[in-house]
Amino acid sequence: MPMPNKPALAAAGGLPDSTAIAYEARTGVLCRDLIRAVDTLHDASDFCEAIFMAAVNLEEPEEVRVFQRLAQAAKNGIREAILTIDAVRGIPEVNQ
């Protein structure tokens, strides 16, 4: 049986769309590198959550609010970076 000329999907939605594949071919960025970057960003997001929770133990209420705002701002930036990488990879945004 001859091999098909077109790639076959392993499962519905299992592979990135052609935009992500074209991006990888054009830029040389490998999907595994993007996955590693997203994993690192998720780790950083977890650290932001830990900072947010640890801030409750500060003595001054204003200090608590400042650290929590900073942690939340950092976490929001990380989330935007993850969404950007997922868009490049062709993964749709999931509402949380």
Image (spheres, rainbow, N blue to C red):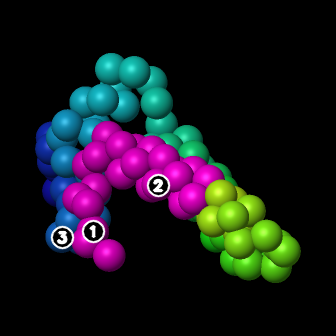
Q: State which region is magenta.
A: 69-96
Q: Amino acid at mark 3?
A: Ala
- Give the Cα separation between the discs numbered 2 and 3: 31 Å
Counting from the top left corner in percent of width and height, residue 94 is at 27, 68
Quadrant of the snapshot with the N terminus: bottom left
Under circle 3, the secondary element is: loop
User: What's the residue at 71%, 72% (across, down)?
Assistant: 61
Q: Amino acid at mark 2?
A: Asn
Q: Mark 1 and mark 2 in contact (Cβ < 8 Å)?
A: no
**Which is more N-terminal, label 1 or label 3?**
3
- Give the Cα separation between the discs numbered 2 and 1: 15 Å
Counting from the top left corner in percent of width and height, residue 82 is at 44, 51
Q: Amino acid at mark 1?
A: Val
Please tell me the numbered disc located at residue 76. 2
Q: Is residue 41 visible?
A: no
Residue matched to label 3: 12
- Give the Cα separation between the discs numbered 3 and 1: 17 Å
**Which is more N-terminal, label 1 or label 2?**
2
User: Principal SS element in the magenta part?
Assistant: helix
Counting from the top left corner in percent of width and height, residue 23 is at 30, 29
